[in-house]
Amino acid sequence: MPNNCYFNMVVSGNPENLRKFLELFIYEEDIGGDKKEYFARTFLESWKNIGEFMEDKKEEIENGVIDINGWCAWSCHSCWIEGYPKGKECITLIEACKKFKVSVVVESEEGGMQFEEEIECDEEGNLKEDCYDFVDWKCKKCGEKSGFPRAYEKESLEDETCYNCDSEGFWEDIREMEIKDLKDMRVIVSEEEWVKCSEELKLELIALSRMTGEDIQNNLTDEENKLYDKLAYDLDGGLK
Ligand SMILES: [Zn+2]
């Protein structure tokens, strides 16, 4: 069984083209039937058929911008970019945008494998695509880690339950913890002392810095950054 990848797609185009573009989705009544052309495994099954969907989105269509929420099997990438299953009925996103002169902006979330996608395609078929892993948070009650989308803040996690111990909303941002730990470590380890550090401690710091490198760099003062670079340089040298 594939995992469901939930997406939000904002499509812009003229109303006539938007209506044609909407035929590419699989509505409840389409499931199991034949369709001449469609996005592979891409479902808007909350709507019985395209007629019902268009009725719902009447105003948006007339205004030239529609907001669509649906789901794909596995990932938007595998369904629209790879075009799985490769068959002549399954149109890719690039083909569809060019054919119907629409541009799309997509955000998706896949909770099973814990990733999110950002996809954009304009009416010339220029595609931009990014995929990110969920960020790990730690349950303060039991210590179990769980991933959530990058945009989630502590407030958005108040209703999220730990699958391990069932407690709700006790999430701690591991990134913040790691940055704090690293700062603590630096207070202990001055540049001079660094060379005297045990290999084990050095390795620990390497692992830590590689895990959260970007976040660390963005959260440090200039002076801390200089030290960070120096430490990383020494460490890489020492490992060769
Ligand atoms: Zn827990």
Image: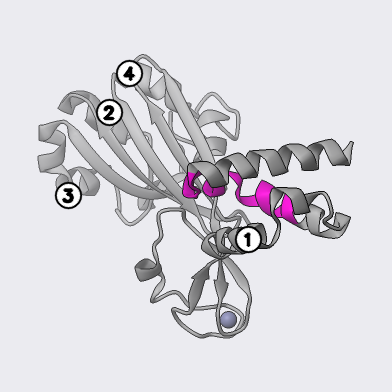
**Element class at badge 1:** helix
Task: Compute the Cα span from label 4 to label 1.
Answer: 54 Å
Of the residues under marks 4 and 2, which one precedes in the sequence? 2
Of the residues under marks 3 and 4, which one precedes in the sequence? 3
* Position of 196 relative to 144 (above/below): above
Residue at the disc numbered 4: 123
What's the residue type where badge 3 is placed? Asp
Task: Give the x, y percent position of residue 23.
Answer: 32, 34
- Depth-wise, is mark 1 or mark 2 nearer the camera? 1
Of residues 99 and 212, the one drawn nearer to the viewer in this rendering: 212
Residue at the disc numbered 2: 20
Crowding near pointer 1: few (<14 within 10 Å), some, many (20+)?
Answer: few
Of the residues under marks 1 and 2, which one precedes in the sequence? 2
Of residues 48 and 219, the one drawn nearer to the viewer in this rendering: 219
Tell me the tag on residue 187: 1
Is residue 132 among what the camera can see?
no
